[in-house]
Image: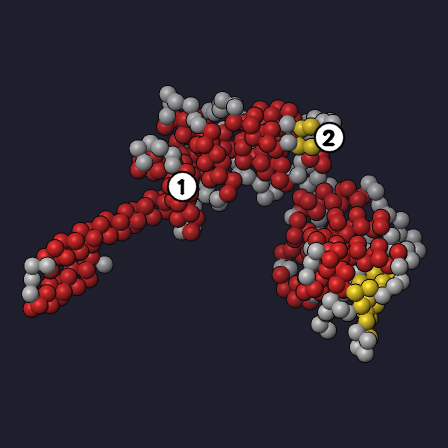
Amino acid sequence: MELFEQDTFQCLNDETNDNSQMGLLFLLYQPLIGNEAVALYGTLLNHGKLTTEKLSHARLCKLLMMNIETIERARVKLEQYNLLKVYFNQQTSEYIYQLLKPLNAKSFLNHYVFGIQYKQRLGLTDYEISKEMFDHDSIDQSGFSEITARFDQSSLDRISNKDVEEFISIKANQIKNDPNMGFIKGFDYQGFVKGLSELAFPRRLRTNENMRLIAQLSVIYGISTQRMRVLACRSINVKEQIFDQSALINRVRKEQPSYDHSQSDGYDLPPIVFLQNKQPNMPISLSAKKTLEYLVNDTPLTTNVINYLIEYVLDNTNNILNQKYVEKVAETFVRSKIEDIDQAKDLIKRLSRQTKNDELRDQEIKRTKATIKKMDNGDIELLKKQIKDKVDRMK
């Protein structure tokens, strides 16, 4: 049923539903239904507590700063996840919205649809963090039975047998202290968190985003795991309980990398160390550091490919690490799905041959144009044929 702004609605609430349930929507349902649906649920919930008057959907559009199409999509999501029942009077174009209570945390996380989708969306590490968090503050389930929820059947097509098997085999403490899943290769996550106290680096600040940044900076700048622990802990605002990413980046950029060159060949060095070796008598500029951070953080290229790229750019720009040129080459490598140095070298050879052919073709065209000016029509036709033969041979 298509929704219009002039259509009116009233709200009915589950008597046991209150604003305290919003925490469940933000932390559990939101990754599955989206922030628009969560905002719609909260708005309808409070409307239902304050008034039984008929209100227009135009009001919802203004309150939520959404158009009517977005609100309709959000409403459907709430229906699919059994958070809302909708009743419609076709003669009067009036709706009744009955808000339903969300599943408690334990039921949600162990649900064979919601739980799997949640794990699939956030990853195993964050699934376990949520599980551990709610285990310490479980909700009393006495008097309630599990609600069979409606959902989008097509979403099950995206769940593989492997996802199901992995979900079933999950144990509460399996990866509680293992943030190593899905992070940067080459960084010792276990070594970083081993013996790290809750006071020095609170667990709730060890998010995927923060840990990934720490790992990326360590790999880029060749800073040891233990030194990164010191820099990371110094970047925590203890009073506000905030991890200051900018402070960490600034601290790392001021560090002098200490890397054991015997552990790897040249192309496997951290990019900062590799670049420093290329310019031993000159410190690395801030702009160059930002360029290397871009290559590691924003592209899927491996460390040795990044170092080969650096070398290639320096060789072709009089030892200047031109950011735009770096980005251009990096984009070419990414589009060509370059995974190792051999593939990168082959690509460069192909591009070099193409560039040389293009230059030869341009030179031939210039010479031809100059000759044409001195020729009659018969000679021009003969020349066109000769040019075509030459071009065909150059392809």
Quarter of the picture containing the C terminus is bottom left
Q: In this rendered view, identify the residue nearer to me: 174 or 144.
A: 144
Q: Which mark is residue 141?
A: none
Amino acid of disc 1 = Lys
Question: What is the secondary structure assignment of the residue under circle 2?
Answer: loop
Residue 348 in the figure: left or right of residue 220: left
Residue 208 falls left or right of residue 218: right
Q: Quadrant of residue 268?
A: top left
Q: Secondary structure at mark 1?
A: helix
Q: CA distance from mark 2 to mark 1?
A: 39 Å
Query: Relative to residue 375, is residue 252 drawn left or right?
Result: right
Is residue 327 visible in this depiction of the protein? yes
Name the residue: 80% across, 68% down: 8
The residue identified by callout 1 is 324
Please state the horizontal and vertical placement of residue 360, each as a whole percent of the image.
19, 51
Which quadrant of the figure has residue 59?
bottom right
Q: Earlier in the sequence, mark 2 or mark 1?
A: 2
Residue at 8% in and 68% down? 377
Which residue of the protein is positioned furthest toward the top in this rendering? 281
Q: Residues within 10 Å of mark 1 (few under 14, many from 20)?
A: few
**Looking at the image, residue 77 lies above or below residue 226:** below
Residue placed most toward the observer, 293 or 151: 293
Give the amino acid type for the residue marked by disc 2 in the picture: Glu
Residue bearing mark 2:
240
Residue appearing at x 76%, y 69% in the figure: 6
Q: How far from the left and from the top, in percent, is residue 9?
A: 82, 66
Instruction: Look at 55% across and 39% down and name the residue there.
Output: 184
